Image: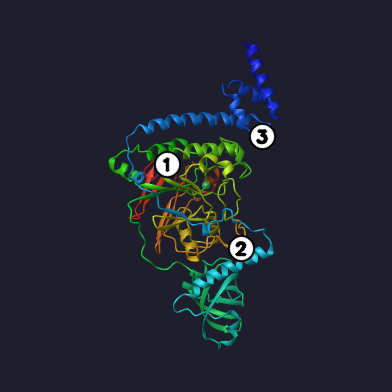
């Protein structure tokens, strides 16, 4: 027996030597217990094979096996989805897709292009507003003192003057100007409190000096008021986000319940009918927990290898019925650049999913038209910036930050905030069209709001409350898959965790 073990160990070491890989004793001991040790080693591409890596590969294989079993169970049900009977009708709006288009080198000229593209688009929207006739900033001197003037500019500075008036410096290609908000005007001060650096705003005011204006009102590029659009076909889109697969806190049990459910294992006929209408699924980022995202993360990982995390992700996503078109964007935990706009997760991590006809990897932000309705999908990193930069927002109401970004028609919140941006020549962060839906994640908290024809939906998460969230006092809403009927715009929460609202208390 002893000789047999030694022989197997020798075979393992020789196998690695042949592939010019180094293997430590612990890894050899682990593999010696595995029947399929050759297959496991073939999957490891590292030159130095560690015990951690071997453990995660073994764990992945085990979960793969249990998933296969589950798939067989759900296939037994005789569920027929109406969404399966119809062809999909969608278009990834590649004109707003950064994937494969990133041209920035981070040079001064890139920043200049970025700002001029942003300014041209946002000032163009403001110029179209009825009753607003902006003067170029260098023409302010031609107006008489106290004459009413309309101006547009990008905010470069904001401070409180010695006389305690809020003062804003705006810039434009035609010059600069100082805008003063009187401390006695509570309403305009409230509005001015929302203005952030780099915002492009319209000002209605009275000239005070050649480069100074007294503010009487602000205008945002904003969405127009309109009736919400609906689809003709009675189909739904489902939104999930922030699985953080690979984290010890990933709620695998609950996610498996969701997978079983979406395959037709429902409690009631009515629920089954609703599942049958799901034709599209949006996955809004932080699909895996990543490796090395923050300093103490390593100890919090159940799968300590990024490929292992994506293997697990692949196994889970593959269990979603094939008639559902899946759109997956990255988040700050995924294996792409952290800075926005983020390109799609590369093929090397998720080959099998790239080869699946119904799975589409898109950037963050990205735009997808489904059943004639346009959805803007963004993981939501800049939402965090909104909370730190603006008072009056609540992390339990992510929809409030979403509305603030829609008002700006801009998903970025200014350079110098927490979230980094890459200055692309074409600014992918701008909200160039009026979306019918704005789908996001990131805050780990559900949230909904209807705003000027756009339905904002923020997904919760599939990760239990982290130590960081406990420190921040943030309570997530995990284990909820949200479905939105495209014909009626009705939102339904499907809760796979805990109490009535899914909150962790
Ligand atoms: Fe997340």
359 sits to left or right of 347: left
Give the CA separation, mark 1 to mark 2: 37 Å
Q: Position of residue 430 (x, y in %)?
A: 53, 63
110 sits to left or right of 380: right
Q: Residue furthest bottom?
A: 144
46 sits to left or right of 492: right
Instruction: Indicate whether 123 appears above or below 253.
Output: below
Q: Residues within 10 Å of mark 1 (few under 14, many from 20)?
A: some
Q: Residue at x 60, y 37 (%)?
A: 305
Task: Quadrant for residue 42, please give it.
Answer: top right
Q: Position of residue 468 (x, y in %)?
A: 55, 45
Q: Give yes or no for contact between labels 2 and 3 (Cβ–Cβ under 8 Å).
A: no
Instruction: Indicate whether 17 appears above or below 445.
Output: above
Q: Mark yes or no: residue 387 visible.
A: yes
Question: What residue is shown with label 1?
Answer: 322
285, 251: nearer the viewer: 285
Some atom of ligand 1 lies within 8 Å of the CB belonging to the residue at label 1: no
Question: Going from the N terminus, do you reach mark 1 or mark 2 first?
Answer: 1
Question: Going from the N terminus, do you reach mark 2 or mark 3 first?
Answer: 3
Question: What residue is shown with label 3?
Answer: 46
Q: Give yes or no for contact between labels 1 and 2 (Cβ–Cβ under 8 Å).
A: no
Task: Indicate the secondary structure of the residue bearing disc 1.
Answer: loop
Question: What residue is shown with label 2?
Answer: 425
Instruction: Indicate whether 132 appears above or below 75.
Output: below
Question: Going from the N terminus, do you reach mark 1 or mark 3 first?
Answer: 3
Q: Position of residue 169 (x, y in %)?
A: 60, 73
313, 101: nearer the viewer: 101
What is the image's colouring?
rainbow
Give the CA separation, mark 1 to mark 3: 33 Å
């Amino acid at each position: 027996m002893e000789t047999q073990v030694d022989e197997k160990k020798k075979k393992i070491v020789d196998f690695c030597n042949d592939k010019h890989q180094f293997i430590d004793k612990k890894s050899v001991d682990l593999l010696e217990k595995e029947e399929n040790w050759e297959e496991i080693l073939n999957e490891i591409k590292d030159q130095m094979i560690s015990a951690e890596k071997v453990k995660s590969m073994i764990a992945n294989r085990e979960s793969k096996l249990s998933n296969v079993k589950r798939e067989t169970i759900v296939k037994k049900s005789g569920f027929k989805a109406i969404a399966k009977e119809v062809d999909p009708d969608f278009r990834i709006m590649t004109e707003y897709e950064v994937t494969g288009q990133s041209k920035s080198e981070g040079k001064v000229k890139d920043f200049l292009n970025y700002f001029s593209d942003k300014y041209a688009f946002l000032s163009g929207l403001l110029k179209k507003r009825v009753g607003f006739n902006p003067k170029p900033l260098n023409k302010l001197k031609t107006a008489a003192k106290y004459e009413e003037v309309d101006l547009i500019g990008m905010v470069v500075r904001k401070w409180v003057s010695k006389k305690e008036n809020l003062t804003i410096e705006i810039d434009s290609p035609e010059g600069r100007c100082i805008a003063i908000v009187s401390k006695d005007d509570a309403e305009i001060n409230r509005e001015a409190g929302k203005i952030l650096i780099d915002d492009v705003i319209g000002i209605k005011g009275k000239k005070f000096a050649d480069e100074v204006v007294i503010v009487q009102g602000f205008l945002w590029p904003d969405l127009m008021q309109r009736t919400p659009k609906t689809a003709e076909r009675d189909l739904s889109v489902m939104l999930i986000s922030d699985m953080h697969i690979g984290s010890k806190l990933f709620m695998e049990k609950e996610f498996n319940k969701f997978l079983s459910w979406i395959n037709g294992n429902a409690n009631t006929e009515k629920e089954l009918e609703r599942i049958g209408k799901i034709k599209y699924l949006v996955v809004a980022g932080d699909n895996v927990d990543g490796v090395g995202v923050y300093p103490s993360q390593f100890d919090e990982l159940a799968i300590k290898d990024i490929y292992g995390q994506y293997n697990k992700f692949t196994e889970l996503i593959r269990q979603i019925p094939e008639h559902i078109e899946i759109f997956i964007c990255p988040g700050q935990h995924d294996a792409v650049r952290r800075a926005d706009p983020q390109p799609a997760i590369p093929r090397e991590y998720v080959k099998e999913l790239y080869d699946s006809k119904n799975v589409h990897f898109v950037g963050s932000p990205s735009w997808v038209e489904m059943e004639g309705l346009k959805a803007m999908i963004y993981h939501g990193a800049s939402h965090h910036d909104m909370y730190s930069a603006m008072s009056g927002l609540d992390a339990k109401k992510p929809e409030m930050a979403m509305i603030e970004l829609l008002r700006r028609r801009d998903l970025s919140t200014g350079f110098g905030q927490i979230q980094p941006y890459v200055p692309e020549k074409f600014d992918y962060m701008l909200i160039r069209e009026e979306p019918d839906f704005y789908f996001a994640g990131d805050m780990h908290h559900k949230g909904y709001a209807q705003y000027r024809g756009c339905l904002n939906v923020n997904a919760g998460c599939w990760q239990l409350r982290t130590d960081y969230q406990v420190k921040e006092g943030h309570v997530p809403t995990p284990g909820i898959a949200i479905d939105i009927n495209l014909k009626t715009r009705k939102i339904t929460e499907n809760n796979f965790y805990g109490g009535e609202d899914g909150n962790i208390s």
